[in-house]
Image: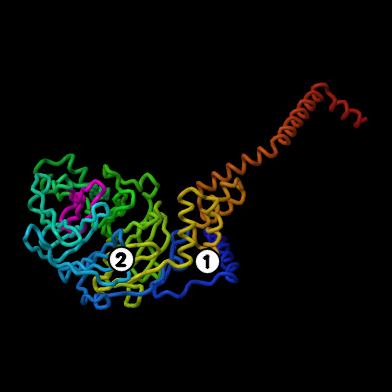
Amino acid sequence: MSGLKKLISILSAAAVACSLATVTASAAESYDPYSYDRWGDAVASQAGYTADYFVDGTTIGCGAFNEPGDFFITEDDQLYIADKGNNRIVVTDLDFNLIETLTEFDYNGEKLELKAPAGVFVDKYTDNLYICDTDNSRVIKCDRDGNVDRLFEKPVSELYSQELTYNPQKVLVDKAGNVYVVVKSVTKGAVMYNADGEFLGFYGANRVEATAEVIMNAFWNTISTQAQRERNTKTTPIGFTNFDLDDDGFIYTVTDSQEIKTDAVKKLSPKGTNILETLGATDVKFGDIDPAYYSIYTKNSSLTDIDIGPNGEINILDFAHGRVFQYDKLANLMFIIGGTGEQLGTFRNATSVESHDNHLYVLDSRKNSITVFTRTTFGEIVTEATNLYNDGYYEESYEPWCEVLKYDGNYRRAYIGIGNALFQREEYKEAMKYYKISISRARYSKAFEGYRNEFLEKYFSLIMVLIVLLIVLIIVYKQAKKRGVFDRRRAKRRM
């Protein structure tokens, strides 16, 4: 393996060296751009996004933020910011011009005031605003002017333990008007209501991981008495902490845990099953893969927010490392953005991420600011190639993937993309080379099968002639031997 790894590293370096004359590297970033090679080792990479600037409450003109917890970009390009510590919602356009500040809401003549709002969402179908009024234990539904239509409060149901607090953190609404609320004290999934506020149950619960402790407890529960089982620690799943909705209405969830190995990121069907499993993404390690780049971070990723981009990109925020991990819609890693620190493009408490067009917005609750990232030229090429590739236009993605390798010879998916394009052209032998570099064994096997069939088809007539000739020669030899021809010749030579 070490020899193969060395060979592929040399080939990758050669690909980069050949491009230096024509490609200029992206400008130096305030964070360290990196990715992972085909062995899962962290390697330096071109930046997919560059940090342009940041804004804070003073810049916007609404006064300093105080631990902002969430924000949301609407269909008409307005930004709603849940300024938790100031008990308000700040509304701006995407140039951060202040539109309004919401602190009071009218509920049938009664004035409602916010208390530590942690989440905000605007329904693109109805234009209604939903606010997690966390410390008031409710979710407010209102119009953009602050006129309250309904309050979603703690469910009164046998399904919802009344011993649990109701402290809503995040909220979203699907096409049918169903409301989903992430409650910090609930581990059974999102609390779900219909459009009329009726509690429907829980949605999208994570599975209990089959750890050694869980398996042992399950075994002992089969042989224990009822009293012993009641004394055992109850095994419960870890509740997810954030979610987002894509353009097709699918809900994606992310679980903030440094221990969980399954269900860290899910794309949920209407029945609550994980669609990513059917896409072959069950083995994806979301967040940092050990060892982290520069190996200065010893703790695991803590995934706390998720955003679905315009092309189905999955943007996942890692609170522990202050990074955004961007994956394509098939859960293939595209870019790693940001880091921890004080300079532009790094964070102290990154709490929320949003995307719009070719920009990423990251909210920092400790710096009390929003940082704006813009996709680089390299990022644009990778995005173009990825979209063509994922939509099945393998041959059309060939040129963009080749351009990607000019920027970054370690970009594994470019080798796979080029290999697929060559495979579609039935250039199997060339495809095998790129699959070998990317260590794509299954694809290499298919290309080899195609190359073998192509070889057999091309030389089939010649091979058949040779086989027939060989058979004839064998028959002639056996007949001659049977008649003693070779014995008589040997006898004559002895005479």
- The amino acid type, in three-letter code, at marker 1 is Tyr
| Of the pair 228 and 114, the residue shown nearer to us | 114
Q: Label 1: which residue?
A: 407
The furthest residue to the top:
483
Task: Return the mark for residue 158.
Answer: none
The spot of residue 173 in percent (x, y) is 23, 52
User: Mark number for residue 299?
Assistant: 2
389 sits to left or right of 255: right
Looking at the rendered structure, the kind of residue marked 2 is: Lys
Q: Which residues are magenta?
A: 168-193
Farthest residue, direction left: 110
Residue 86 versus residue 346: which sits nearer the camera? 86
Percent coordinates x, y for residue 470 in the rendering:
75, 32
Callout 2 crowding tier (Cα within 10 Å): few <14, some 14–19, many ≥20? few
Residue 391 within the magenta-colored segment of the rendering: no
Quick check: 480 above or below 294?
A: above
